[in-house]
Image (cartoon, rainbow, N blue to C red):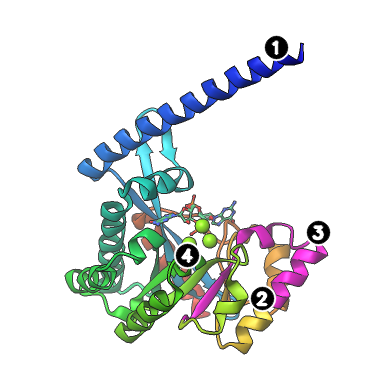
Amino acid sequence: QAKQRGRNNYQWYTEHLNRQVSESMTLRNELQKAIEALSFELHYQPQIDARSGAVTGYEALLRWPHAEQGMISPARFIPVAEDTGQIIPISLWVLARACRDARRLQLDGLQGGAVSVNISAVHFLRDNFLDSVREALRASDLPPRCLELEITESVLLENAERAIALLRELKALGVGLALDDFGTGYSSLSYLKDLPIDKVKIDRSFIRDLIDDPRDAAVTRGIISMAHHLDLQVVAEGVETAAQAARLFDSQCDVFQGYYYARPMPLSELEDYLRRARPAALGLA
Ligand code: C2E
Ligand code: MG
Ligand code: MG
Ligand code: MG
């Protein structure tokens, strides 16, 4: 009986594994076609200044519209693209498009602050990453202070010294630097003081249960206080309710991002959003 079950489990396991492998092969192939056809989109999610309510920036979030499966989440295809190296052309496209879109908003007189672009560690650690950033700025004519790069602690894993040197060069170029998903990595505390960054983004997992779980509230307050002592700004990700926003405000959080304020949206909607947001931010509405 046990033997039988063992064999069935084994069979289930290999079938499951085979299915996973073939699914990811299909995903790779489809990803390749999407890269060649440039069939990606960027959506933008506003970031709100806690005190003034003004829009301080907006995060570029990659979208892959798929014929059969609808939008495929970047959480699903980015890891595949990182494994295959396909992340490089994708990431270059994101960087170029985000800079171009941000410049266009600027030329239209819309004050949205800086555009934040998520950078995969795989791209960041390539030899010519700095050149890709310079090129995106040059091609778009976007001032460097209007671009912010979101990196995660994973850039530090291989060679922290080299990563920190590169971050310094990016700072010298004038772009903003934010540490994404803060609190979920391992090296955060030992490295945080040495990182030439401007901001930390508290991971959504801490914000989710902020109201009901005193431990999440404690960690969140601790992160904010520590970051402020290091002269870093704090962004809260995944703010979904007024109660969370109020609690974060009390804890001195600087910037809010989440569905409570706005969902990620296409550029045209962001333009409308900024047109509407502007008078309110100036107290004229
Ligand atoms: P992230 O950079 O931490 O982005 C925040 C994620 O939280 C986004 O998911 C956003 O849509 C979602 N989010 C924002 N507010 C809320 C909220 O109030 N509630 C909930 N439940 N979710 C919220 P998304 O767009 O699915 O992206 C997932 C991850 O994929 C991103 O996490 C980032 O790590 C990665 N990603 C997205 N775009 C890019 C890109 O262009 N390049 C790279 N390398 N990674 C990207
Ligand atoms: Mg991000
Ligand atoms: Mg994040
Ligand atoms: Mg993430």
Q: Residue 234, how many percent across, how many down?
A: 58, 76
Instruction: Please report whichever mark, 3 or 1, sits nearer to the chain's N-terminal start.
Output: 1
Q: Secondary structure at mark 4?
A: strand
Q: Which residue is mark 1?
A: 4
Instruction: Please report whichever mark, 1 or 4, sits nearer to the chain's N-terminal start.
Output: 1
Residue 210 on the magenta span:
yes
How far is disc 2 from disc 4 in space, using C-alphas?
A: 22 Å
Q: Which residue is mark 4?
A: 46
Callout 3 amino acid? Asp
* 110 left or right, relative to 2: left
Q: Which residue is mark 3?
A: 212
Q: Residue at x 30, y 63 (%)?
A: 95
Q: Secondary structure at mark 2?
A: helix
**In the image, the residue with mark 3 has its CB under 8 Å from the nearest atom of ligand 1:** no
Q: Residue 63, how many percent across, how many down?
A: 39, 47
Whether the residues at callouts 2 and 1 have beta carbons within 8 Å, the answer is: no
Image quarter (top left, top right, bottom left or bottom right) of the N terminus: top right
Q: Residue at x 31, y 46 (%)?
A: 40
The answer to whether any part of residue 245 appears in the image is: yes
Magenta span covers which residues?
A: 197-223
Q: Residue at x 44, y 71 (%)?
A: 57
How far is disc 3 from disc 4 in space, using C-alphas?
A: 26 Å
Instruction: Please report whichever mark, 3 or 4, sits nearer to the chain's N-terminal start.
Output: 4
- Say which of marks 3 and 1 sits in front: 1
| Snapshot quadrant of residue 255 | bottom right
* 88 left or right, relative to 115: left
**10 Å crowding of disc 4: few (<14), some (14-19), many (20+):** many
Q: Secondary structure at mark 3?
A: loop
Callout 4 amino acid? Pro
| Snapshot quadrant of residue 4 | top right
